[in-house]
Image (spheres, rainbow, N blue to C red):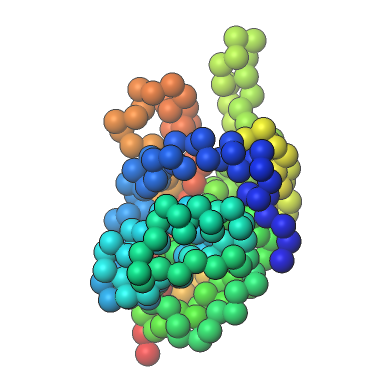
């Protein structure tokens, strides 16, 4: 398993200072759209791929999930999750998304929030998730939007006064590694086209149930910089189901 960027002390400290790290799901701009997409979790078995601090694991436990497993490649993330979001039904494990064994028909719901855009091979992830879901199980994920990952340096073009003019997009149809700066560090993400993200699910046998582009909540649009978040999509929420027997 490759070392995780989130185990870098400087990067992790910067991540810990982010509002979503300190405030949990209530501080995550996409949560108001992601939460309604979750299926009923009472008595269900839930797998969280790239669980981070374990906020979604905690939510599943609060909703009555019978068993929850949070996976993350970062030892620092898993240590934080165990400390901040424990519950009797939750287990945490240091494990990359690509390294997990995905036992057949093991989980009723698989979730992943802002982790899949670090992976080059989405098709393999889809195949593994399809295998590990029970019939009728749900795969719900939030991935950086292709317009965002295809952004040049993932930043705006600015005028002479520092105001954002436009969001440049280039090499959209060329998937692969994109280098950008995030929290003061150079970060490598993987760009996937919308066709790859959605058709990969359909080819695997999933049934699409919802596709939403995340928008900031109306009540925060007056905060600095938030109005510009309405000028281009940053996140893509996708809900897919494995057909029942």
**Which image quadrant is residue 179 in?**
top right
Q: Is residue 171 visible?
A: no
| Residue at x 65% of width, y 72% of height | 99
- 211 sits to left or right of 157: left
The extreme top residue here reads 161
From the top left corner, tell me how far across and down residue 17 is, in percent. 51, 35
* 5 up-or-down from 66: above or below: above
Quadrant where the C terminus is found in the figure:
bottom left
The extreme front residue here reads 83
The extreme bottom residue here reads 245
From the top left corner, tell me how far across and down residue 37 is, in percent. 33, 59
Q: Is residue 84 visible?
A: yes
**Which image quadrant is residue 38 in?**
bottom left
* 162 up-or-down from 243: above or below: above
From the top left corner, tell me how far across and down residue 221 is, in percent. 36, 27
| Residue at x 46% of width, y 59% of height | 82
């Amino acid at each position: 398993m490759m070392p995780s960027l989130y185990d870098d002390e400087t990067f992790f400290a910067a991540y810990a200072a982010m509002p979503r790290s300190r405030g949990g799901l209530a501080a995550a701009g996409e949560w108001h759209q992601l939460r309604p997409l979750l299926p009923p979790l009472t008595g269900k078995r839930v797998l969280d791929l790239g669980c981070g601090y374990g906020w979604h694991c905690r939510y599943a436990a609060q909703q009555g999930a019978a068993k929850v497993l949070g996976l993350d490649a970062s030892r620092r993330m898993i240590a934080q999750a165990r400390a901040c979001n424990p519950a009797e039904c939750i287990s945490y494990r240091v494990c990359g998304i690509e390294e997990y064994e995905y036992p057949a028909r093991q989980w009723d719901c698989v979730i992943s929030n802002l982790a899949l855009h670090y992976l080059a091979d989405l098709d393999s992830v889809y195949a593994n998730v399809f295998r590990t879901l029970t019939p009728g199980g749900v795969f719900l994920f939030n991935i950086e939007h292709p317009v965002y990952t295809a952004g040049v340096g993932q930043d705006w073009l600015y005028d002479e006064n520092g105001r954002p003019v436009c969001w440049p997009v280039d090499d959209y149809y060329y998937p692969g590694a994109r280098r950008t700066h995030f929290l003061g560090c150079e970060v490598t993400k993987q760009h996937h086209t919308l066709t790859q993200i959605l058709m990969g699910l359909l080819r695997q046998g999933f049934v699409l149930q919802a596709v939403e582009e995340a928008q900031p909540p109306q009540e925060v649009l007056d905060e600095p910089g938030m109005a510009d978040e309405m000028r281009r999509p940053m996140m893509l929420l996708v809900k897919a189901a494995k057909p029942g027997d």
